[in-house]
Image (spheres, rainbow, N blue to C red):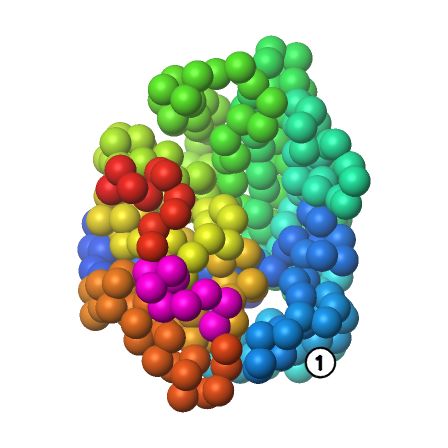
């Protein structure tokens, strides 16, 4: 696989040469492996109407737009969608690094009417590494620790089997560690539990077995700084979580970069935006220090107005921070 802008940035970050322009922005378009049809989002008309969910071809077109405009450093997809856009020629000449979701444990099974997400995570893999290698050598592997011995033990066993196969086949990965989805940990203990679980599960690995970077929930400045400063060679990234307001999106990018993260991998915050391409462009401006989060919201709304797109929320409402964890930063 050829070198990409992502490879260059990651090399500088790991070598201690990080600069603001090296912040890595990734778009997660793998939610079809989580929630099926609703994962693609509603078709949004310029007047704000949402008559139905988008079709798969419409969803693929939105992915291709971001790739065509070279807006992100990494595009994370399901194998089936990566295969589809490859056949359509979207990868030709692109500087974007493509990755696939390499496993789909049960805590991400968010089907309408289902309860899987509320039960302790169980390991599962739909995708075949051997077949995915036709399109990329990078995948996302996710794991959830619940402070449940049987569940966590089984998840770690599955992670070990994945690493062995990946190493054998020359496949690399980044590691997503979700917050517990079914545990009795207190809110105060959760951030430190997750940090310790990450460091503990990687401590027995050689460099060639380790993930290229981490993707974790943002559990506040203290927890992120602790993990990001623990090992300078362990590059930490944050996941986006729910859609939230536009200010929530830009505030998360700002705080993540400020407290040591070097990657933002967002799904719903991009996919459910009025104008995903402009949302990503403004994320980049915030990460690079060119705009404050508040200024970025105002600029984004100005772009919507000029394009004749009705915003989801009025500017005043969209400038509010609504996610409690961001209020601590």
Residue extent of the magenta highlight: 311-319
Q: Quadrant of the C terminus?
A: top left
Q: Quadrant of the N terminus?
A: bottom right
Looking at the image, residue 51 lies above or below residue 155 = below
- State the residue in front, 126 or 28: 28
Looking at the image, residue 46 lies above or below residue 38 = below
**Residue 317 inside the magenta-drawn segment:** yes
Residue at position x 31%, y 31% in the image: 223
Q: Is residue 225 left or right of residue 310?
A: left
How far from the left and from the top, in percent, is residue 262? 32, 51
Residue at position x 36%, y 74% in the image: 300
How far from the left and from the top, in percent, is residue 285? 29, 69
- State the residue in front, 100 or 181: 181
Badge 1 element: loop
- State the residue in front, 306 or 172: 306
The picture quadrant where one finds residue 301 is: bottom left
Residue at position x 38%, y 53% in the image: 248
Residue 156 shows up from this direction: no
Q: Is residue 239 left or right of residue 35?
A: left
Residue at position x 58%, y 81% in the image: 47
The picture quadrant where one finds residue 58 is: bottom right
How far from the left and from the top, in percent, is residue 287? 28, 61
Residue 34 shows up from this direction: yes
How far from the left and from the top, in percent, is residue 292? 22, 63
Count residues near mark 1 (Cα–Cα under 10 Å), then give few for <14, some for 14-19, many for 20+: few
Residue under numbered circle 1: 88
């Amino acid at each position: 696989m050829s070198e990409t802008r992502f490879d260059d940035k990651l090399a500088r970050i790991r070598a201690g040469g990080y600069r603001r322009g090296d912040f890595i922005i990734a778009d997660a378009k793998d939610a079809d492996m989580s929630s099926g049809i609703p994962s693609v989002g509603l078709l949004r008309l310029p007047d704000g109407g949402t008559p139905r969910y988008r079709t798969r071809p419409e969803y693929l077109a939105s992915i291709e737009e971001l790739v065509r405009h070279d807006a992100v450093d990494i595009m994370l997809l399901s194998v089936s969608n990566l295969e589809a856009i490859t056949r359509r020629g979207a990868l030709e000449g692109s500087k974007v690094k493509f990755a696939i979701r390499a496993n789909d444990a049960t805590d991400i099974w968010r089907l309408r009417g289902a309860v899987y997400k509320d039960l302790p995570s169980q390991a599962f893999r739909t995708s075949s590494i051997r077949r995915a290698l036709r399109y990329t050598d990078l995948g996302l592997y996710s794991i959830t620790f619940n402070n449940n011995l049987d569940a966590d033990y089984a998840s770690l066993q599955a992670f070990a089997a994945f690493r062995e196969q990946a190493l054998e086949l020359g496949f690399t990965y980044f590691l997503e560690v979700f917050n517990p989805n079914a545990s009795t940990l207190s809110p105060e203990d959760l951030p430190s539990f997750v940090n310790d679980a990450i460091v503990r599960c990687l401590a027995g690995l050689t460099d060639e077995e380790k993930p290229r970077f981490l993707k974790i929930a943002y559990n506040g400045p203290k927890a992120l700084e602790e993990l990001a400063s623990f090992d300078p060679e362990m590059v930490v990234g944050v996941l986006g979580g729910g859609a939230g307001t536009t200010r929530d999106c830009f505030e998360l990018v700002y705080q993540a970069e400020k407290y040591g993260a070097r990657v933002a991998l967002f799904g719903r915050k991009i996919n459910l935006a009025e104008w995903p391409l402009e949302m990503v462009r403004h994320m980049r401006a915030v990460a690079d220090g060119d705009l404050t989060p508040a200024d970025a919201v105002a600029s984004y709304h100005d772009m919507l107005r000029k394009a004749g797109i009705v915003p989801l929320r009025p500017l005043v409402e969209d400038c509010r921070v609504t996610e409690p964890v961001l209020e601590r930063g």
